[in-house]
Image (cartoon, rainbow, N blue to C red):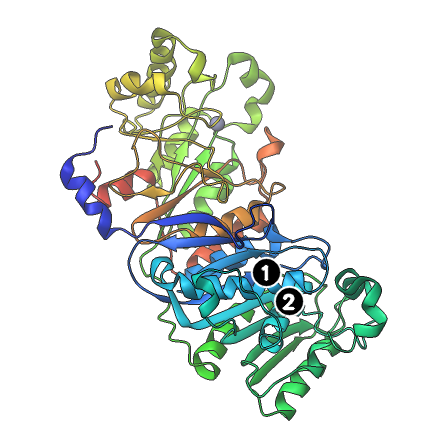
Amino acid sequence: MCKTITEQKKLSENIIREIREVKLWKDPSLPSSLSCRLRNDGKKRPVILVIPGGGYGFVCINEEGYPIAAKFDEMGFQTFVLTYRVTRYPEPQLDALRAIRLIRSHAQEWGADPDHIAVCGFSAGGHLAGCCGTLFHDLDAKDGDEGDSFSQRPDAMILSYPVITFRKTQYIATGKRLLKEDFDEKRDEWSLENRILPDTPPAYIWATATDQLVPYENSVLFAQGMWEKGNKCELHVFPDGPHGMATGYERRDLKLWMEQAKEFLKVSATFPVEGGEKGRTVILTFDDAPKNHLTTVAPLLKEYGFGATFFPTFFTEEWRKENGQHLLAPEEIKEISDMGFEIGNHSFSHLNMQELSAEEADKEIGKLNDLLASVHIPRPVSFAYPGGPCAENLRPVLEKYGLKLARTGTRHPHICAETMWENFRTDLMKIPGTPIVEHLNGKLNFYETLGQCSKDNAAVFVFHGIPEKVHPHCNVTEKTFRYMLDYLKENNYTVLSMKDYAIQKNLI
Ligand SMILES: [Zn+2]
């Protein structure tokens, strides 16, 4: 679709996220990097530098990196995720300190507030974040460029079930991976409760009393050290929970830690956090017409007051014969329509559209439109490409049938080949849909996509059945689905159908 000049101009009014990978050092052979989640709105925001754990053996970026950054982004921070070397001391430490310098030296360009940078580490990453706040005088993370002249002291620390000490812990593998043959000699020196300084920045710490890998006593030890020296420190020990709870997942108590950390940063570290953007929109779409779209999904959405688009298909006769009992009949699709939801076109037989001739494609789309019309469902304006990828050859056919919006199902939140649905910029025949599949990092992809969402940059999610019986590889359980709906409600998302969003933004 062609964009007019007026539409292009409006671009600058929209907040657009760009994810950029930046190497930390001039030496290109070093793997250390910073994943920057940048906005184009010219504002500067307080910073969270996320440091994932992994026992100094790997970097657990999918669980303790991206989703954490996404959530803090949603809360109004400028976020960065660190990939550090897992070699030996002090290389990981030099990476983390270098990252702080780089953020300060690029503050203007990256929308970062250079006076309010918090490191946020998990497990071994908690040790690394703690090192930033205790060893910043001792380690030299310069690289012969403009970054060298900036301070490498963080302004606050958030430590999640941190290793923090090698003195008392029973679990010494992490320390041995860091200190190697020097472990016995250096374990006290690298136990951070021994290294607290008058200018060690304020720390927020959380742990669980039943952590099976890193004892909560580590956190207590460090907190005591902070309080004894007169430094600010807040410590939460939750009564139970295993190691590695990251975002807190479904735990209603644990998942509050990020809110608590934010308040700590505001009150005890004077971070000017303005809060997340209001008016963020999520579009929910449901493909392939399983029965539970009528029995479970539509009633649940009603209960929450959410809009959505349903994309039914009929599948081939053969397929119908075998799986018909799990699939909605046209009259049942009409019931969903009567409940106020948008019904789109997903083609009649769900074939690979890229391989069809114009004539065959015409038949596929026309036939489903006819079927919907036969039960008096309003003529669709939205389309979803069967199987996910965009089929360019369909454009004239979609146009002919008055289909103005077409969704893919191939977007992955941190392989950013496709953007979100950005108003005025996204090709309306190629609206990127993020599929949510429970066993393929479904929850993490959900969080991460939300973190990329803004007022003019909607997230479009693709669900199938709740649960999905015909295509189990697309499954999401009802429990998880309800959890996601709760999350959207609690965080004040506007949840719409594709059509309603497009109307609201004057796109159709
Ligand atoms: Zn489908």
- Amino acid under disc 2: Leu
The kind of secondary structure element at disc 2 is helix
Where does residue 412 sit, x and y in percent of width and height? Answer: 49, 40
Q: Is any atom of residue 77 visible in this view?
A: no
Compare marks 1 and 2 and give the one earlier in the sequence: 1
| Label annotation for residue 58 | none
- Image check: 28 left or right of 217? left
Tag 1 residue: 95
Ligand 1 under 8 Å from disc 1 Cβ: no
Nearer to me, 25 or 235: 25
Where does residue 352 sit, x and y in percent of width and height? Answer: 47, 17
Tag 2 residue: 128
Disc 1 crowd rating (10 Å Cα; few below 14, some 14-19, many 20+) is: many
The kind of secondary structure element at disc 1 is helix
Residue farthest toward the front in the current orientation of the protein: 144
Where does residue 434 sit, x and y in percent of width and height? Answer: 46, 39
| Quarter of the image that includes the N terminus | top left
| Quarter of the image that includes the C terminus | top left
Where does residue 94 sit, x and y in percent of width and height? Answer: 61, 64
- Amino acid under disc 1: Asp
Residue under the image location 27 percent in, 39 percent down: 425
Residue under the image location 84 percent in, 63 percent down: 181
Tag nearer the camera, 1 or 2: 1
Residue under the image location 39 percent in, 48 percent down: 18
